[in-house]
Image: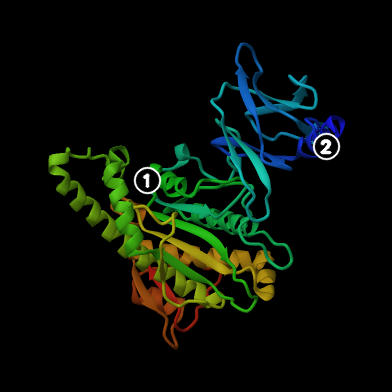
Amino acid sequence: MQRFFAFVITLLLALVVVPAHGANSIENIRMWPSPDNTRIVFDMANAAEYSYFTLNQSHPYRLVIDFPSTELKVNLDYLESNSLLVKNIRTSTPKLPGSTRIVVELDKQVDPILQVLTPQDMYGHRLVVDLPGTSLKREGHALSADDLQERKVTVAIDAGHGGEDPGSIGPRGTYEKDVVLTISRALANMINEDPGMQAYLIRSDDYYVNLNDRPRKAERVKADLFVSIHADAFTTPQPRGASIWVLSNRRASTEMGRLLENKERLSDVLGGVPAVEMEDSFLNETLVSMSMDHAMASGYEAANEVLAELGRITKMHKTKPQHASLAVLTSTAMPSMLVETGFISNPTEEQLLRSNQHQQKLARAIYQGVRSYFLRRPPDGTIFANNRSSRHVVRSGESLSVLAQRYNTSIAAIKARNNLNSSVIQIGQVLEIPSPE
């Protein structure tokens, strides 16, 4: 009988005790460098268990991560690093058999941030490692904060999603993050070619930026407008068309409360004016409320200008700005809008969004709408404010020569102000007429 019980106990232990070797595995390693940090993602078969330490005695500096009872299924010889911060990723002898030790060689000393993520959407278990520090040079067309000039209207362009977050995925496998980055880059080029404007790309390449950090980045460069570019999606393929979203009153009230609690950011929002002490907090609240009201009203007005231009080149899903409680639309320091360029879930519209010609048209429409808004509402001290122009709606029988004579200017000046490549104008077209020469 004792032998029987011993056999049963041994059998039960064999069934419930998982061998240490191969209890987990690293299925893939992905790297996402950005201007501010490098994110390394370890895709795991099961929830990650780990410990880590750093070695900063000599260069290259090292981050060492131990994965107990974990098998490495990735060939690190084929893992290339395009990060300025991460020089190499390799293995080293683990502390225990059946475990994996990963060594990340770094160009600079960092304070790493590690977090375990549970399965979500298209991803399984992950260990995410964030390494702060300059990791990617901004593209040539993407101005850095130091490149921006004070007297130009600054537009912060936010390409949605990025990095390990693909956004919505079309029927043909098109990633929203790729489409909106292309449109954002085209928009930035058009704005930077305008003598009165300059663009700052929140995301200039394929990496992720935290949603709450996006408007904060725009605030830090003192942007005059925040434009977030996205592509919509729905559970059925029928919906299509572009739309624009602006901040809702409910989200605005919540954000105002958070802002009042953050004295450092409050000072930035109020133009460098220090936040007053608690006994005068009513003054802070009044100033922030005025700033929020102005930002929301201006955002709605700017959105209408962009909607009008988009309606000329694409189908519209909504013809008026829609209000939403979105994290990226939380700045009181500037007007903001989120542009849905179309439904990537609609096969026809997905094909359009993949087209470079359509992407350029979308970027041009957004640019023209933004420009029209700032011509009517130029920030003080900018080129637009110092060189105001009148607006004219083209009527039947009018030509550039007729308008040039009427407004005491030249055909060349009107073409330059409106970025016209030819002298052909259409009935209903809105032209900006420069001051007399």
Q: Nearer the observer, disc 1 or disc 2?
A: 2
Secondary structure type for disc 2: helix
Question: Sequence-wise, which precedes: disc 1 or disc 2?
Answer: 2
Residue 98: x and y in percent read 80, 27
The image quarter in which residue 28 lies:
top right
Residue drawn 15% across the image and 48% down it: 282
Q: Looking at the figure, which quarter contains the C terminus? A: bottom left
Query: 360 and 127: which one is in front?
Result: 127
View extreme (front): residue: 1
Residue 404 vertical position relative to residue 219 in the rendered view, above or below: below
Q: Position of residue 12 (x, y in %)?
A: 79, 38
Tell me if label 1 and label 2 are in contact, CB under 8 Å.
no
Q: What's the amino acid at mark 2? A: Val
228 and 10: which is toward the camera: 10
Please rate how many residues cluster around mark 1, counting C-alpha atoms within 10 Å: few if below 14, some from 14 to 19, many from 20. Answer: many
Q: Mark 1 — residue?
A: 222
Spot the residue most to the top: 57
> Which quarter of the rendered picture does the N terminus lie within?
top right
Q: Report crowding for label 2: few under 14, some 14 to 19, many 20 or more residues within 10 A (C-alpha).
A: few
Task: Point out which mark residue 203 bears.
Answer: none
Which residue has dot 2 on it? 8
With 107 as the anchor, is 396 left or right in this view? left
Q: Amino acid at mark 1?
A: Lys
